[in-house]
Image (cartoon, rainbow, N blue to C red):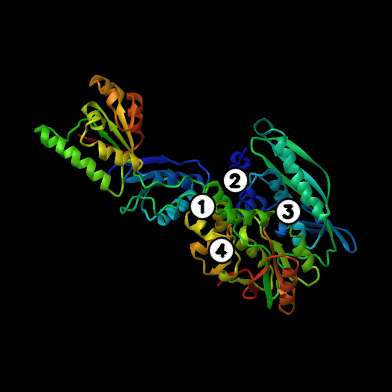
Amino acid sequence: MNLIVRDLDARGLPCPQPVILARKALAEGGFGRLDILVDDPASRENLLKFGAYAKCQVEEQPGEGTQTRLSFTPPATGGTQPAVAPAPNAAPQVPSGTAVLLLSSDGIGQGDPDLARLLMRGFLYTLTEADQVPKRLLLMNSGVRLAVEGSESLANLKKLEARGVEVLACGTCLEFFKLTSSLAVGGITNMYEIAGHLLEGSSLSIG
Amino acid sequence: MKLTDHTRFSGCGAKLGPGVLEQALCGLVQPAYPELLADFSGSEDAGLFRLGPHLALVQTVDFFPPIVDDPHLFGRIAAANALSDLYAMGARPITALALVCHPLKALGLEPLKAMLAGGLEALVEAGCALLGGHSIEDPEPKLGYAVTGLVDPERAWRNNTLLPGGRLLLTKPIGTGLVNMALRAQCASPEAQAAAEHSMATLNKAAAEVLARFHPMACTDVTGFGLAGHAAEMVSGEHCGLSLQLDLIPLLPDVESYAAMGLIPEGTYRNREGRLRFLTGNTSASALDLLFDPQTSGGLLVALPDSEAEAALLAMKEAGVPASFIGETGGPAGLVRIV
């Protein structure tokens, strides 16, 4: 269950801006609950209608005067996409998820290094078979070893890349391990971009 | 350049709610000029002032922020919308004055030229002479016209002179407010957009010319107060009310789904607040979202004697007017029954 709460302040915005914001946020996903603050009765009614339309569970916390906070919990099955029709002029939806995964090691967990590597290989293979793939994989520290020549996960990372997952390896880490010229999948990134990607939505650290 | 980016409200949705207007006008009186036949106290579509035995001046004004991004089209719609009040009274448009608010720095001169050209095109189509106008610099663009027409006051169509046994005809589909909201949310279908634009840019001239061959009991044009809001004005007479049959009301494409998504103009809620007390019957939320949708350059809503109704509908079709029966007159005065 996703416990991330996204907050939107739609006070003072004319119709249909609050609905547009809610619709956009739901399409982006990456949260378990969307809280929208409004102060206009018409916007409130429109958001309640939109909530029903998008099959969200909606709870209301009235505030002072006409101000009220509406909490939207998106439907649990298969992400939030099907309930919200894409805009006709929007880019076609690719079946990728919104999660950003940070792989900071070539294995998962501490202790026996062989088990850790086995778990990482199994994890990446499972991702290639999953219905919903992450949006991005960020490789740091020894995680960059997964994406170089000779890696036992190289084929799986290439499969993921073919399914639209952006694979990015930390340039500093590649240099440290003197593996820059061996990178065999994805691109090279820097700390600035990594921090940006990690802060833009929901992200998980694996490894 | 998107015209509608510069507006908060758009089209007739920018209108003050009827409740507000009634409060503001409450208690305002002017001398009983002998020539004055209709003024703001009667919620008539336009004012009437007698010039002679069979001649009266009809005056009305309407202006609003852009409802479409194409400035030429917006000009046409603004003129068609202003002229509509004259057609609703059976008057012949003669002169117009432009009201222009324009953010010159933000938009430049070109869109203004295009808007005025579009407006003039519609005025020429109406045979209405543009005499001049007034313009001011304003952060939000607005355009409209004060228009004057002539009518024989004894034959002018009023909006609240319903009699039982009549049928109601509506000459354009409703839903322009919802389509406009959907456009702003970038989820309007091309079909809905095209249909709304075509409908708003069409003059009510042909419809009024057909009606002039018959004997309308009462007539109004459907604009900012929505179909139900204007129907509520029609039942303010003493003889009877009216009923609207929901499934007969013509809608622009896809507007029901826009309403379900919550893309409802603020004007709808204001209209509902001001006029809900006149409605009985099926007043479900989904019905009200359509019935109170503020229309820009909407059609004529006319009550015709039953004996003439079929012939009038046929004549409308022949004139290319997409008219349909949507209900009948009758029932207690002061009430709009939704069935």
In the drawing, what numbered circle is on residue B277? 4
Amino acid marked by disc 3: Ala
C-alpha distance separating marks 1 and 3? 25 Å
- Element type where label 4 sits in the image: helix
Q: Name the chain under label 2.
A: B
In the drawing, what numbered circle is on residue B9? 2
Percent position (x, y) of residue A82?
Answer: 39, 54
Crowding at mark 2 (Cα within 10 Å: few <14, some 14-19, many 20+): many
The mark that comes first in sequence, 4 or 1, is: 1
Q: Which residue was labeled with disc 3?
A: B80
Q: Quadrant of residue A198?
A: top left
Q: Is residue A51 left or right of residue A17?
A: left
Percent position (x, y) of residue B157?
Answer: 77, 65
Amino acid marked by disc 4: Arg
- Marks 4/1 in contact by CB < 8 Å: the verdict is no
- Looking at the picture, do discs 3 and 2 lie on one chain? yes
Q: Residue furthest bottom?
A: B307
Percent position (x, y) of residue A150?
Answer: 22, 31
- Looking at the picture, do discs 1 and 3 lie on one chain? yes
| Residue drawn at x 26%, y 44% as measured from the top left | A127
Crowding at mark 4 (Cα within 10 Å: few <14, some 14-19, many 20+): few
In the drawing, what numbered circle is on residue B263? 1
- Element type where label 1 sits in the image: loop
The mark that comes first in sequence, 3 or 2, is: 2
Q: Of discs 2 and 4, which sits in the foreground?
A: 2
